[in-house]
Image (spheres, rainbow, N blue to C red):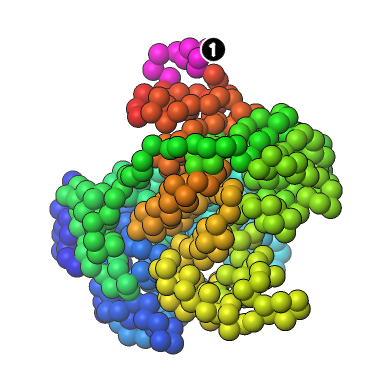
């Protein structure tokens, strides 16, 4: 750790840092989350913090925001020691935090969420009037345009994130902590967020960015600090490092940033979908005649901006379509018809037909958050013969199986008794991936496999997906990460507005071509205007 590391184009000075942590330690029972952490964040910079899932990044920032109290150490804000007893103390000190999972009241308006907890008195009308004026100014200053009267549940994820940032700025935050801010954003929304952060930095705000995406670190930060297993192992100027060096610092070994795999050897058809249509309960057509095939031993990647029918496709194939929806079309699995609607269309039946599913939202669809890891490993497979017979489950057998999977998939901390909610997001994902991959399904449905996952875990998950393909299994991969689609897929289909816009081979695809298809334009039929997209492979 080098506390005085230089920032990009900005030499270190003797001026007080915006934030300085000295010797911070925090343990949760036998788990040492933070050990003797030193960190210095200069004013008016964007400071990245990276590390594997479970490295202690979020715990450290939660200490800074007053959610946890350190067992040892000192915090200085603007050069002055400060005991941060709770989040209100942090807010008064000018610290704001935007969490990975937003803290918004879904049925409140934007304006009501902004003033919640920051009302000027018993009467709401003056507070709302004041907030409306302040929000208008903030929106103009920082490109944070959001309708103040819109209900939060009706906003896109990107706009909900803007509300969280507005909440912090409304409370006059000079230091803004963002925890995995792009994990649920489309590429376009992420680009807009970066423009907002650059604007905040230009106005003298200090940004602490927790992310696992090395490209974001290299693009937006001035300085980056690396944590590993609860300790701070390095702090360097971003301009003087590289993604490869950062990855090695994070994991403690060299990491392959590109997927290595042999050419696919497709076999017989596993999944055949014809004319699949879906109209939701509000009468909106979400799928408009989907045709696709996946063969044994290949990965079909589905690219597209989130919200163009990918979720509905995965839900129908996985056996839990949205209630009240009308579905038509035909699905065949290993040559046999598969129900698309009705009581026979359910997740348990899909599993019996050889379909595994890693869902897009691990916390809502993949795990029972209050259940222990060993219980979640059996989730959906509790009637498997190795877990017991009839109504009697062999808990010891389930625990032994969970312990083995946790070891093989390097889940941290390596305990099967911890509740799912107490694991980091990436380790939660590993539990779901371990459960589904090790069931050896004929077809594996995967939604956003590495969302919120660190570089070491990404490498591991990608390798297991390729191993499953090489074992002759069919894989349907849905991801908003174009790099992931391009590196993992053997064929790429692009969805737009509930349709398959086109299909490409990874070796022939460019980001420009895929970007046009994602925007609803078939470049083969309608050549783009020169310069609309930068072509790259």
- Give the quadrant of residue 36: bottom left
Quarter of the figure with the N terminus: bottom left
Identify the secondary structure beneath mark 1.
Answer: loop
**Is residue 185 shown above or below 269?**
below
Residue at x 37% of width, y 86% of height? 71
What residue would you read off at disc 1?
Answer: 525
Magenta-tinted stretch? 523-532
The location of residue 447, given as percent across then percent down, is 56, 49
In this image, 392 relative to 501: left or right? right
**Magenta stretch: residue 530 in it?**
yes
For the stretch drawn in magenta, what is the main secondary structure? Answer: loop
Compared across the picture, whether 202 is left or right of 234 comes to right
Is 34 situated above or below 245?
A: below
Residue 57, can we see it?
yes
The answer to which quarter of the image holds residue 255 is bottom left
Q: Which one is nearer the viewer's eye here, 122 or 513?
A: 513
**What residue do we see at 45% from left, 28% from top?**
505
Write down the quadrant of residue 292 in the picture: top right
Horizontal and vertical percent for residue 148?
Answer: 64, 46
Nearer to me, 329 or 514: 329
Q: Nearer the viewer, residue 304 or 3?
A: 304
Numbered label tally: 1
Q: Callout 1 environment at 10 Å: few (<14), some (14 to 19), or many (20+)? A: few
Q: Position of residue 194 (x, y in %)?
A: 40, 43
User: Residue 216: x percent and y percent?
Assistant: 35, 47
Q: Residue at x 29, y 62 (%)?
A: 251
């Amino acid at each position: 750790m080098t506390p005085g590391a230089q920032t990009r184009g900005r030499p270190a000075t003797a001026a007080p840092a915006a934030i300085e942590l000295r010797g911070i330690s925090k343990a949760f029972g036998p788990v040492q989350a933070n050990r003797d952490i030193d960190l210095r964040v200069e004013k008016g910079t964007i400071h990245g913090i990276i590390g594997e899932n479970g490295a202690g990044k979020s715990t450290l920032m939660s200490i800074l925001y007053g959610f946890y109290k350190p067992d040892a150490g000192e915090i200085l804000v603007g050069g002055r020691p400060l005991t941060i007893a709770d989040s209100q103390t942090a807010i008064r000190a000018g610290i704001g935090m935007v969490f990975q999972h937003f803290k918004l009241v879904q049925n409140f308006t934007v304006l009501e969420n902004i003033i919640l907890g920051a009302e000027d008195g018993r009467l709401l009308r003056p507070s709302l009037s004041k907030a409306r004026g302040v929000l208008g100014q903030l929106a103009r200053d920082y490109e944070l345009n959001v309708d103040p009267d819109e209900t939060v549940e009706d906003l896109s994820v990107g706009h909900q994130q803007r509300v969280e940032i507005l909440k912090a700025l409304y409370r006059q935050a000079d230091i803004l902590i963002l925890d995995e801010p792009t994990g649920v954003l489309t590429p376009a929304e992420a680009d807009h967020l970066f423009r907002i952060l650059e604007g905040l930095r230009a106005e003298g705000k200090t940004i602490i960015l927790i992310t696992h995406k090395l490209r974001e670190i290299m693009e937006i930060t001035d300085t980056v600090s690396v944590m590993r297993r609860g300790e701070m192992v390095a702090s360097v100027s971003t301009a003087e490092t590289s993604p490869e060096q950062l990855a090695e610092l994070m994991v403690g070994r060299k990491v392959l940033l590109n997927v290595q795999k042999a050419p696919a050897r497709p076999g017989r058809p596993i999944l055949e979908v014809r004319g699949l249509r879906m109209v939701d309960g509000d009468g909106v057509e979400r799928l408009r005649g989907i045709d696709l095939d996946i063969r044994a031993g290949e990965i079909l990647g589905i690219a597209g901006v989130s919200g163009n029918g990918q979720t509905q496709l995965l839900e129908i194939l996985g056996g839990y379509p949205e209630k009240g929806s009308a579905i038509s079309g035909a699905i065949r699995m290993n040559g046999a018809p598969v129900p698309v609607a009705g009581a026979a269309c359910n997740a348990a039946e899909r599993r019996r037909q050889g379909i595994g599913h890693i869902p897009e939202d691990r916390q809502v669809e993949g795990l029972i958050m209050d259940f222990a890891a060993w219980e979640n490993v059996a989730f959906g497979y509790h009637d498997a013969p190795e877990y017991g017979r009839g109504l009697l489950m062999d808990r010891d057998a389930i625990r032994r199986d969970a312990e083995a999977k946790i070891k093989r998939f390097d889940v941290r901390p390596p305990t099967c008794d911890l509740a799912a909610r107490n694991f980091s997001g990436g380790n939660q994902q590993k539990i779901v991936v371990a459960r589904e991959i090790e069931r050896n399904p004929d077809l594996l449905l995967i939604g956003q496999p590495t969302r919120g996952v660190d570089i070491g875990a990404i490498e591991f998950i990608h390798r297991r997906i390729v191993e499953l393909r090489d074992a002759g299994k069919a894989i349907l991969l849905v991801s908003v990460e174009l790099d992931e689609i391009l590196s993992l897929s053997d064929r790429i289909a692009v969805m737009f507005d509930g349709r398959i816009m086109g299909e490409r081979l990874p070796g022939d695809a460019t980001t420009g071509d895929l970007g046009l298809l994602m925007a609803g334009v078939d470049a083969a039929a309608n050549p783009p205007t020169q310069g609309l997209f930068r072509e790259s492979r």
